[in-house]
Image: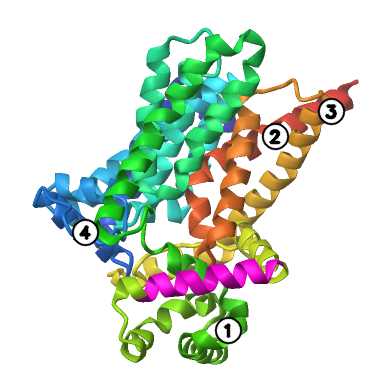
Amino acid sequence: MFKKLQEYILKYPVAILLTYGILIRLLVFVFYHHVSIFPDSEDYTNLAQYLLNFSLENYTGERTPGLPFLIALVGGNLYLTVLIQTLLGILSLYLIYDFSKTKTGNVLLAFWITIITTSFLHFVFFEFAILTETLSMFFLFLSFWYLQKYEVLKSTTPLKHYLVLSVILSVLYLVRPMFIYVPIGFSLFYLVKNFNFGIKKILIKTLAISLLPLVTFYNWCSLNERNIGQFTSSYYLGMNFAQVATSFFEKAPEEDKLIRDVFVAQRKYTRDNLPYHLYPMTAWFAYNQLIEETDYTRLELINEMGRISKELIKNNPDLYAKQVVISFRDFWFTSSLLWNVNEFQNVTIKKSLIGLWNYLEHYLLILINTLFLLFSIKKLFYFFKMKCQVFDLDLLIVAIVLSGALAQALVTYGSNSRFSFPYFPLIVYFVLVNVMTLKNNYAKRTLS
């Protein structure tokens, strides 16, 4: 029976994958039939209204316009937004399969990489949420698929492919601004990999990868500077730094006594009365009280929180480093499944899916992340052992994922596992390829 299944998979891999992906999403639609709205969602729908009015005048800079543009494109209809996200999710299945097959030359391995990726609940349920996770994952993976498909890392590749890649990476930044580091990382990797071909020959292509994303970054930050007086992708950055400084906010000086004391009192209440995973949200829980007691506007308060937090980070590097380690750990060893679980109409389905996530997929996800870290160490060890000569796509995956994990840890605390989701297909691919390599090497040693 297993042999027949294998033959069927080899004969119709794409058809099976697409059928499986569509079936899962239809089942979610039937039993969930809900657009998941969370606190972040309001920022995206608000910006969508600005875009629908064809004006960003006086926009206060909460978010970048990637997801809001999609919402505006369908006239603000959130159901159509979710529909497009599910279609992108299905398209992602093909991209994951095609990428894995092209990279490994193994249809079966590519098939199971794709099946495992799409079988995780968070992969599907993020498509039903008004959040940036699905779009971020799609455009990040699309960039790697394009790299592989058109051999963009080779010095002989036509310039047009670097320009297309730069468009993809610009959209990725507009969806989630933290990914501005990706085009920079791609450019540096390409430059070092092809340096022996001559700097003049490769410089234009190196710049082509990152120039448009950086121009996009500059233009969006400049727009925010005109509207709110800050050159930033999002004015929430001040709150992000406040979350990072949560555990040592009591060290703020006396001139910031009012904000410090309200913040610390809220931190104690959160720690003593609320679940641990809400501890990083202390800054937001204190927000309304601080608005009342300081008479600051929203923007003024967030600016003050950012100023105080940056001073705390500067003056307490040891405590900041400790917090970065915690955030880096949470990126790998916690998990996020964002859904409105009470919207399930069928109690049996609801309990079954909760059990599936809590008792199986949650632990599998952490196991996969752990294996990624171990295999990444192995990959880096081999890279240095070979005197930094092997610049392949797997090394770039390791570099981009580890850099992203570190970057988010440096600037935010809370929901760190959400930041890991866009990398999920790359992580699954890398882990399964390495597991299969170990298996094959072991089989060879056994036979010999």
Residue beneath disc 1: 253
| Crowdedness near tag 1: few (<14), some (14–19) or many (≥20) residues, C-alpha within 10 Å | few
Residue 365, how many percent across, how many down? 59, 54
Give how far apart the Cα atoms at labels 3 and 1 are: 49 Å
Circles 4, 1 touching at the beta carbon (< 8 Å): no
Q: Considering the numbered disc 3 on the image, is that residue within a helix, a strand or a loop?
A: helix
Q: Which of marks 2 and 4 is nearer the N terminus?
A: 4
Q: Which of marks 4 and 1 is nearer the N terminus?
A: 4
Residue beneath disc 4: 59
The region drawn magenta spans 301-317
Residue beneath disc 3: 385
Instruction: Reply above or below: 152 against 319.
Output: above
Instruction: Reply above or below: 169 against 402.
Output: above
Residue 58, how many percent across, how many down? 18, 59
Give how far apart the Cα atoms at labels 2 and 3 are: 18 Å
Name the residue type under label 2: Asn
Q: Nearer the viewer, residue 25 or 164?
A: 164
Q: Considering the numbered disc 1 on the image, is that residue within a helix, a strand or a loop?
A: loop
